[in-house]
């Protein structure tokens, strides 16, 4: 039983790491795009024209 519990704990930790990695991968491009749009609209006339 202890072995099964240890395996479950490891699997849960791995799943959490995968979810965190996916969140980072999804959030970083969005934040970069927002930053580019905001800076562009303030300075160079906007990225959307």
Image: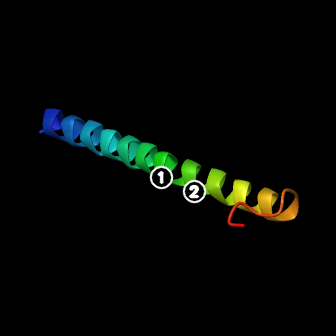
39 or 7: which is nearer to us? 39
**Horizontal side of residue 7 vs 27, given as left or right:** left
Residue position for label 1: 26
Q: Quadrant of the C terminus?
A: bottom right
Question: Vertical placement of 20 versus 48: above or below?
Answer: above
Quadrant for residue 47, please give it: bottom right
Identify the residue at horizontal 84%, vertical 56% (top origin): 44
- Residue 11: x and y in percent read 25, 40
**Horizontal side of residue 45 vs 14, given as left or right:** right
- Residue 20: x and y in percent read 45, 47
- Mark 1 vs 2: CB contact within 8 A: yes
Question: Vertical placement of 46 versus 29: above or below?
Answer: below
CA neighbours of label 2 inside 10 A, class few (<14), some (14 to 19), many (20+)? few
Residue position for label 2: 30
Tell me, for residue 34, which label it has, or none: none
- Residue 32: x and y in percent read 65, 50
Identify the residue at horizontal 63%, vertical 55% (top origin): 33
17 or 26: which is nearer to us? 26
Q: Point out the residue furthest to the top here.
A: 3
CA neighbours of label 1 inside 10 A, class few (<14), some (14 to 19), many (20+)? few
Quadrant for residue 30, please give it: bottom right
What secondary structure is found at the residue carrying circle 1? helix
């Amino acid at each position: 039983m202890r072995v099964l519990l240890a395996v479950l704990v490891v699997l849960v930790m791995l799943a959490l790491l995968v979810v965190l990695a996916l969140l980072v991968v999804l959030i970083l491009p969005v934040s970069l795009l927002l930053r580019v749009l905001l800076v562009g609209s303030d300075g160079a006339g906007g990225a959307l024209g």
